[in-house]
Image (tube, rainbow, N blue to C red):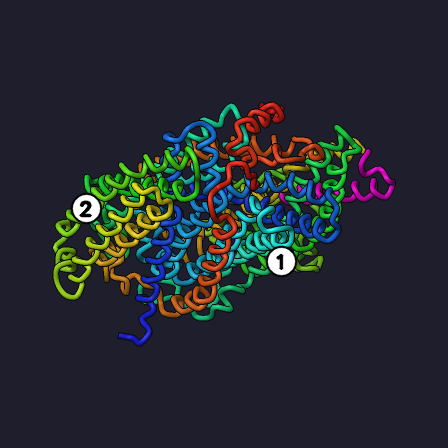
Amino acid sequence: MFGIEALDLARFQFAFTVSFHIIFPAFSIGLASYLAVLNGLHLISGKDIYLKVFLFWKKIFAVAFGMGVVSGIVMSYQFGTNWSVFSDKTGPVLGPLMAYEVLSAFFLEAGFLGVMLFGRERVGPGLHFFATLMVAIGTLMSATWILSVNSWMQTPAGYAINDVGQFVPEDWWAIVFNPSFPYRLTHMVLAAYLTTALVVGGVGAWHLLRDSTSKSARLMFSMAMWMVLITAPLQIVAGDFHGINTLEHQPAKVMAMEGHYDSHPDGAPLILFGIPNPEEKRIDYAIQIPKLSSLILKHDLNAPLDGLDTIPDELEPPVAIVFWSFRVMVGLGMAMLGLALFGVWQRYRGRLYVSPWLHRAAIAMGPMGFVAVLAGWITTEVGRQPYTVYGLLTTAQSASPLEASAVGASLLSFIVVYFAVFGAGTFYLIRLMGRPADTAKGKLNEGPIRTAGLTQAAGMAKTINPAE
Amino acid sequence: MMEFDLAFIWAGLIAFAVLAYVVLDGFDLGVGILFPFLKETREKDLAMNSVAPVWDGNETWLVLGGGGLFAVFPLAYAVVMPALYAPIIAMLIGLIFRGVAFEYRWRTQRWQHWWDKAFFAGSTLAAFAQGVALGALVQGIEVDGRAYAGGNWDWLTPFSMLVGVAVVMGYGLLGATWLLMKTTGSVNDHARRLARPLAVATLALIGAVSVITPFLDPIYLSRWFSGWTIAFTVLVPALILALAVLMFSGLRSGHDTWPFLSALGIFVLSFIGIGVSFYPHIVPPSLTIWDAAAPDKSLLFVLVGAAVLIPMILAYTAYSYWVFRGKVDPNEGYH
């Protein structure tokens, strides 16, 4: 009795903490690269505007990165605290990949972060650019390793099972480059870039609505709209490839995404909308396009597609969640493409900086990358249930032998702390984004460390900062 | 025994990572522990600035300790984490509060004093929880098969509380001597005044923990008082005593660097002492490093990377400390 209860609490705790966590890397991967580009452009062109925009986003990066670090430490210990059986069994295969993440990515980010945030005057522009670049490379390395880990759990390869039931490595190349890894990595890195471009674009648009002549706002908005135009279509293509790969390795997940309760021997329809009815095992009120699903997944109108009727009930993922989260993600992806096309049209007409409706649309889409990232992860993680290591180790078998009271207490603490701490952080982030980019000059707005020890300056900062 | 005992090498590397964590994050957690004793806002600002550029790198050693344990001693990771559940969760929550305070406190005037309190409380909670976890580990963890077999509260003992307090005092000492080294003027004076009682408390607590430990388990007693390790039994306390003398004379004579270096030395020696008690166990009293180790193929795969990457990490970490060397200049803004 207690075992089941503790398991549910542990699952909810993982879902809760990882959902909070993924927000920050999704943003900091993209923002670190953007900062490196701005820093590099300033170094090459010598134009102040790039540095100004760099300094504007650097502050925001520092806060978001801090939140990512502390929520990430929780993740690295949670495998052991709540999922100790999983840790014991997969440690020999997944542990080394995570160790590589720490050694090649986390240290690189952390080691150069201090120089990037505080060291510009001490090391000069060249080394400062180098430090920014190292931070950006660190975030990408981190994504690479952790997505390799996640992908191995989805499509395990290159392993054997030893006599105490541990997964042990047979072929490291096959483990790292497991079948779903290239697709998942591409999809996630593009997602991070797209998410960041939408945030930068939304912030630029917000400032343009107030002052369409602001040079900084124009620069960020223009760069962001180019980036959305490039990454949104690429992301749709990458998503399609990822889906086809999933069909090959985790067909049940795709069945749930598509809402295919029944098999379709001669061409499956694409269900655009509908309400999953798990009791009756059908989609109610389905609006569907005949044979389109077969065309998308198999590139053939009449290709047969199996449905969930071929999967034993106890191995079926929760269909309704996957069905909805997938539609949220795809719908938002299409909206991003729409924004990109709207933007390029207004740019062509010379109205990029003076189109209030474009700016309003960009603001509305500003946070939508995060929603799409979460929806995508919910799709892939819920869709691979009931397994942690696909087809080999179930979620129920993975949990720690803990009492429900312990897991419940820690879950409650995390909920309270996360909402308080990350709620406050989000508030500070939004306030930082709202400060005028062009006037954010000089040392006072440069932040914390500027005001250090100067009581007078601190007092001045007080009057300059209008938000409080 | 094999020619290259990978489990042994890795036990050394994990121990190194944990030691690096303890001394590095030790001083920045210590600055947090001392935060309420520093004056508003000038001393607090300066203290925060002295660690702001390096704290994140310091804390990464903790991630290496955890991630490394998962990689090379997965069984130990799987047993220890549920056994020390409450202290680990408390540590994580403490680290969240103090980690975000680094940025948050500069982002608000009205709430700054709350984030200062969060910085203090989070640092102290994290330090205390680390000490409790260490104490509980020294006391021993009940294992059945490949899993923790004890209850929710096994970690809670007078001894683990004592070690918790010792770590808080020790980190406080590292923090005070760090501030002494990195600052001038009033913060420097203040840090010197704080360092003296902290040094006394730390040394007394190290003494108490060292005296109790051999009696927790006869095997600890035998490790300390038989065989070649008897050398440590004589040497470690003697060296700690010598460093204590160096520290107090540094504090008295106004030398700014000796106290920090002596505090570091005391931590290193205490850590060696723990190593002598533990070896060859990684989870006393049941699991040795060989019981818990991952297969050689895993150990070797990470070792190749570690051999290249750890020297690089040490190099650029040293570079980062070099960039921010010397006294923190209260008039210099480096954000």
The quarter of the displayed image where residue A5 is located: top left
Q: Residue visible at 29% across and 46% down?
A: B247
> Would residue B286 appear left or right of A440 to someone viewing this image?
left
- Whether residue A311 is visible, yes or no, is no
Residue closest to the far front: B253
Looking at this view, is A61 or A149 the one in front? A61
The quarter of the displayed image where residue A49 is located: top right
- Callout 2 crowding tier (Cα within 10 Å): few <14, some 14–19, many ≥20: few
**Magenta stretch: dominant SS?**
helix
Q: Residue visible at 70% across and 39% down?
A: A201
The stretch of residues the image draws in magenta is A329-354
Please state which amino acid type lies under the numbered disc 2: Gly
Q: Mark 1 points at which residue?
A: A244
Quadrant of the snapshot with the C terminus of chain B: top right
Give the alpha-carbon distance from disc 1 to disc 2, as whole Å.
64 Å
- Whether residue A289 is visible, yes or no, is yes
The chain ID associated with circle 1 is A
- State the image coordinates of residue B149 (x, y, percent, origin top left): 24, 49
- State the image coordinates of residue B25 (x, y, percent, origin top left): 39, 46
> Would residue A188 appear left or right of A168 to someone viewing this image?
right
**What mark, if any, has residue B207 been given in the picture?**
2
Looking at this view, is A46 or A307 the one in front? A46
> Would residue B301 appear left or right of A376 to someone viewing this image?
left
| A295 up-or-down from B244: above or below | below
Please state which amino acid type lies under the numbered disc 1: Ile
Magenta segment: does it hold A331?
yes
Callout in the foreground (1, 2): 2
Quadrant of the snapshot with the N terminus of chain B: bottom left
- State the image coordinates of residue A306 (x, y, percent, origin top left): 58, 56
- Callout 1 crowding tier (Cα within 10 Å): few <14, some 14–19, many ≥20: some
Residue closest to the far right: A349
